[in-house]
Image (cartoon, grey):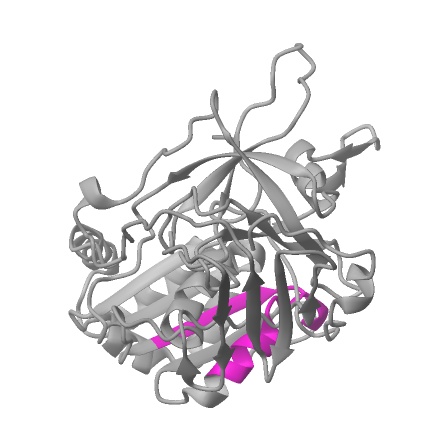
Amino acid sequence: VRHLKLSKAFPKACARLSDTSRRRSRCWGAEERTGGREGAKGQETRKFKGSKREGTMAFVSSVSVLGSSKTGTTCSRVHGFFQRQQVDSAPVAAKSRVTMKAVDKSKVPLNLYRPNNPYEATVLFNQKIVGNEAPGETMHMAFNHDGNLQYLEGQSIGVIPPGTDKKGKPHKVRLYSIASTQHGDFGDDMTISLCVKRLVYNDSDGNEVKGVCSNFLCDLKPGEKVSISGPVGTAMLMPEDPNANIIMLGTGTGVAPFRAFIRRAFAEKNPDYKFKGLMWLFLGVPTSSTLLYKAEFEELAKQYPDNFRVDYAISREQTDSEGRKMYLQYRMADYAEQLKNMFQQENTYVYMCGLKGMEPGIDDLMTDLFAKEGIDWTSYRKQMKKEKRW
């Protein structure tokens, strides 16, 4: 999407999302916290449809049509995928790709842009992805980086909001987990996406307080600029083994890196990565209207029933067998023996992203399960961490 200019009809072009696919969290991984492709002359056509691929398949359920009334790119939705026609684009130098098989940290892209010298990306779209009755507003947004930013699934980028803080100093960088694969939502290595919840709360005096960076991001309009740094992080990278069991435990916008994992494995046809293992997502949210990317996940689960599973814990609408609010650990308890056995397999990797408060409940569940076999869960979890499986 080089030099893409969105038409005035953009709002009408966006698909209306169902009220059931939504929401966020205040979290480590995805919420606000401090902290080339080959060019071609003339006309280039890339098609994405069905299971046959020319280039990289792009599955984007949150947007129906993006159009440019001038030269540049047009995208039309075909059975959930995009067909792009790019006309008279300037040649782009070929770039080497970094894949997630590069376990050597020296080969992982890190801090290509620093907070004191950030990259100025352009907003392509910014759309609400929760229902109107949802507690809070969560947005899915995509930025154009013109192929100048390489990153891997599981990494984060920094966002530097404009302006100064109360002390007159520039705002500090905030980190957000990347919600797209390294190829971007359009499959052309030119974009990066985030999933952000607008932070609004009342302080002890009853005054409304708005999160500086989350509100800046949620208010962005197509064509506006955003300063980004990074990418950062190596702890959440996908495993090298394409036959691995990947268990993903997330709450709210903590689902962002897992969306990247899932799309990498199932929504794209990558010649360098053929996932044949099992991905299992457990997602915790307060209401069904806050289930983020629900339609997207369920469509992929239907297409790949042997390789992808998704289970939800909706705390304000569901209860467990004992009448307790359905939190993540209680949904996991429904599959206790299966999970315990998977945790003990050498090719199982467990990822957590979201509310830090979910960790004690999961530890309690696993402590009881492993104790039945005389295994100390705390020691076993340390061993998993040492083996880079937790």
Does any portion of residue 23 appear in the rendered image?
A: yes
Q: Is residue 274 above or below residue 102?
A: below
Residue toward you, 267 or 40: 40
Q: Residue at x 64, y 36 (%)?
A: 225
Q: Is 168 rendered above or below residue 305?
A: above
**Residue at image coords 21%, 59%:** 101
Q: x, y percentage for residue 202?
A: 78, 36
Whether residue 321 is visible to the viewer of this picture, yes or no, is: no
Q: Is residue 159 above or below residue 4?
A: above
Q: Is residue 90 left or right of residue 162?
A: left
Which region of the structure is painted magenta?
279-300
Q: Closest to the observer: 256 or 385?
A: 256
Question: Who is closer to the viewer here, 248 or 182?
Answer: 182
Q: Is residue 280 magenta?
A: yes
Which residue is at a point 59% across and 47% down the rendered structure image? 26
Q: Residue at x 61, y 72 (%)?
A: 61
Q: Considering only vertical position in the picture, is 181 above or below 314?
A: above
